[in-house]
Amino acid sequence: MTYTVDPAALERARALLAGHPVVDGHNDLPWALREQVGYDLDRRDIATDQAAHLHTDLARLRAGGVGAQFWSVYVPSDYQGDKAVSATLEQMDCVRALAERYPDDLRLALTADDMEAARAHGRIASLMGAEGGHSIGCSLATLRSLHALGVRYMTLTHNDNVPWADSATDKPVANGLTRFGEEVVREMNRLGMLVDLSHVSADTMRDALRITRAPVIFSHSSSRALCDHPRNIPDDVLEELPANGGVAMATFVPKFVLPEAIEWSRAADADMRAHGLDPLDATPDAMAVLREYEAANPRPVATAATVADHLDHMREVAGIDHIGIGGDFDGTPFTPAGLEDVSGYPNLIAELLGRDWSEADLAKLTWGNAVRVLRDAEIVARGLRRTEKPSVATIEQLDG
């Protein structure tokens, strides 16, 4: 499908992004580099055109008006214990290697002020988010170490439960957070690490919002009212964001934004398993199987307008101060028409301009809200560190 956009609106969108670039909440480039080339950056030099292999390269980030990127330091949730921790460290090493290799384009950022400074110097602020509580191996000391090494959000779960929190796509066990899970949230608040509620169950979302002393984020989730997938955010949770101060960053993954894509994705996943492959496998052999299935079973196609529908609804429920963007590029095999890769953000902004979103509101969506939520978490952490010591609680002590 070809997505068309009004040229005048597109020109306005690009001008707006020049002053208020996108802070994207989630990009899986590091894992794609691990899967495809074992982190050999010479073989996937993102200073050159990587459209044949990746959603992301430097030229397309620039074309998309990206000013800050939370790079996911994801590892699969079947990695457990020391294996998960080590692989997370390897992912973090990849992000640092990218920043060192491309200093004229990428700059590591740890704070909201760092994000602003990177933008002022024409660099793309590069932050890290750990995708899943399995990355800390049930250790608060490991959590603190990840923060010390630069991780600025942690998604509490990925697709599977962790021992202390339920995932959106697993069978409930804890019915939200356990006592240790609550302690994880409190320690993240004390550190200034954003609590990311994408991937978690609705009960985990509600528990985290009850426990947290700092704003939360959803790094890549859309509206469940518009697309009834458990990875999305129910309206009652969106309604809590103004009081919390958090930000929900709409994702572009077709099966999370287009209802017709849900059943197609389930069938495609079953076909992958029938070929002995994990549905999350992004290797060339796996992609060949998926493309063969798609050729025989044409998939429903989302567009930038589909994503804009979600942002319209999320704005109505949570308010303009509590929404953002988290594309999930290089973490999904399919993307919407008009948002095929990281160069597509101007198409989305042009779509919203056509829906009479003001430039002031769009500046909050793209840049202002995400920077504010990190700064607010930093302010909370400074206060908590004056009165609270690092927690030495263990999961055995709290959950038995």
Image (cartoon, helix red, strand yellow):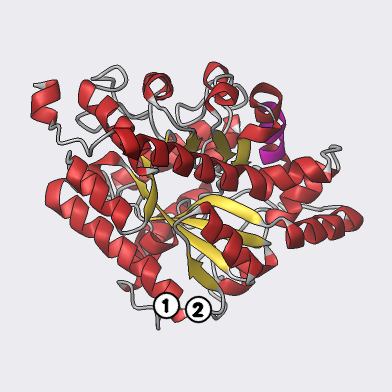
- Quadrant housing the C terminus: top left
Which residues lie in the magenta part? 307-313
Q: Residue at x 59, y 32 (%)?
A: 260
Decide if residue 273 is on the left or right side of residue 381: left
Tell me if residue 371 can be seen.
yes
Residue at figure coordinates x 63%, y 64% from the top left: 119
Q: Are marks 2 and 1 in contact (CB under 8 Å)?
A: yes
338 vs 171: above or below: below
Q: Position of residue 145 (x, y in %)?
A: 24, 53
The quadrant where residue 324 appears: top right
SS category of the residue bearing label 2: loop
Residue 304 x, y percent position in the rendering: 70, 46
| x 15%, y 36%: residue | 392
User: Does any portion of residue 52 appear in the rendered image?
Assistant: no
Neighbourhood count class around disc 2 (C-alpha, 10 Å): few under 14, some 14–19, many 20 upward: few
As shown in the figure, which amino acid type bears the numbered disc 1? Glu
Q: CA distance from mark 2 to mark 1?
A: 6 Å
**Residue identified by numbered label 1:** 100
Q: On screen, 30 above or below 370? A: below
Q: Position of residue 257 (x, y in %)?
A: 59, 35
Q: Quadrant of residue 166?
A: top left
Query: Which amino acid is tagged 2?
Result: Pro
Q: How many marks?
A: 2
Binning the other alpha carbons within 10 Å of mark 1 as few (below 14), some (14 to 19) or many (20 upward) gives some
Residue 103 is tagged as 2
Q: Is residue 101 magenta?
A: no
